Structures are given as C-alpha cells and as structure tokens.
Amino acid sequence: MKKNKSFSLIEILIILTIIGIISGIGFFIFNQIQPKIQLNGTARELITDLRYAQQLAVSEQTKYGVFFSTTTPETPDEYKLIKYGTETEEIFVKKLPEKINFYQIIGFANQEVVFNPYGAVQEEGKIILINNQNTTTTIDVRPSGFVKKLD
C-alpha cells in the first residue's frame, strides 16, 4: 500500500484559522499604534521644514520664517514657509494630516519661528502636536536655532 503525502481538510482548516487569528491580532495592534506613528512622522516632517527654513536663511542671508496657522475644526491646521526679503514671499504651505493638530505654540511671537541670516531664531519656543488619541509630541526650538524633538 502507498501512503498519500498530503494534508487533510481538517489540517488545512486549522492552519487557516491560526493564520486568521494571528492576522486579526496584528491588524488590531497596528490600528492602535498607527496614530502614534503618524504623529511622529508629522513631527519629523515639521522639523525638516524648520531646518530647511534655517538653511535658506543662512545661505541667502535673509530672514525666513515658519508661520503656524490653527484654523477651524472643519479644516486642518497648516504651516507656511515665508521669505522676508524686500517683499514677503510665501514659499509653500503644508497642511497637517487629518487627526493631527497643533496643541500649543509656546514662546513665539505671532505663532511664527523666524530665522535670521546667522541661523538663530528671534524667540525660542516649543511646538506641541497632538493626535486623535490625545498623544502629544514636542518640538523644541532653541535660541541658537537648534531644533529637536523632545519625546
């Protein structure tokens, strides 16, 4: 007699059930951490744009600023990169992702970080972002122009 070397229907169903359970747990965990991942990504992008404004201020020897706009609940918060030369010029506008907002903007006059031609800022301060799970992350801007994420 020859033995069949194959799986039975019950073995295949058990394996599919185990795969389904593991996938369900993974999906649930991903949904729990996804807002935090998005918050950290938004903070990194904002830090990159602040450093870009600083770099432009030093390389072009003129003031550059990042203006933070907190808007109505129906529209997302945004920030703008602005050049202060002989004329004020808006370089770009970026909207924050849905479910992420500015929680607090501390220490900056007119909710704006302004870099001088030496790369320093006029006022030091903090930018605090919040997501829909009330998780916050803080970006610190030092007087020398040093920008970093605190959390």
Image (cartoon, rainbow, N blue to C red):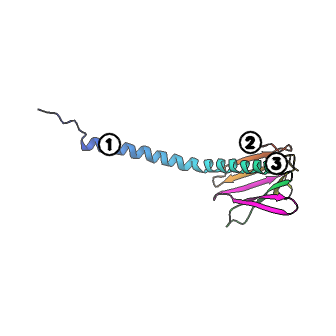
- The amino acid on which the numbered mark 2 sits, given as a three-letter code, is Leu
User: Which circle, 2 or 3, is nearer the viewer?
Assistant: 3
| Residue pictured at 88% horizontal, 61% vertical | 86
- The amino acid on which the numbered mark 1 sits, given as a three-letter code, is Ile
Residue 25 x/y as whole percent: 47, 45
Image-based side of 17 in relation to 53, left or right: left
Q: CA distance from mark 3 to mark 1?
A: 64 Å
Residue found at the far top of this picture: 1
Please report whichever mark, 3 or 1, sits nearer to the chain's N-terminal start. Answer: 1
The image quadrant where one finds the N terminus is top left
User: Which circle, 3 or 1, is nearer the viewer?
Assistant: 3
Residue 88 x/y as whole percent: 84, 63
Q: Main secondary structure of the magenta part?
A: strand
Is 87 colored magenta in this rendering? yes
Is residue 125 in sight in this rendering?
no
Q: CA distance from mark 2 to mark 3?
A: 27 Å
> In the drawing, what numbered circle is on residue 59?
3
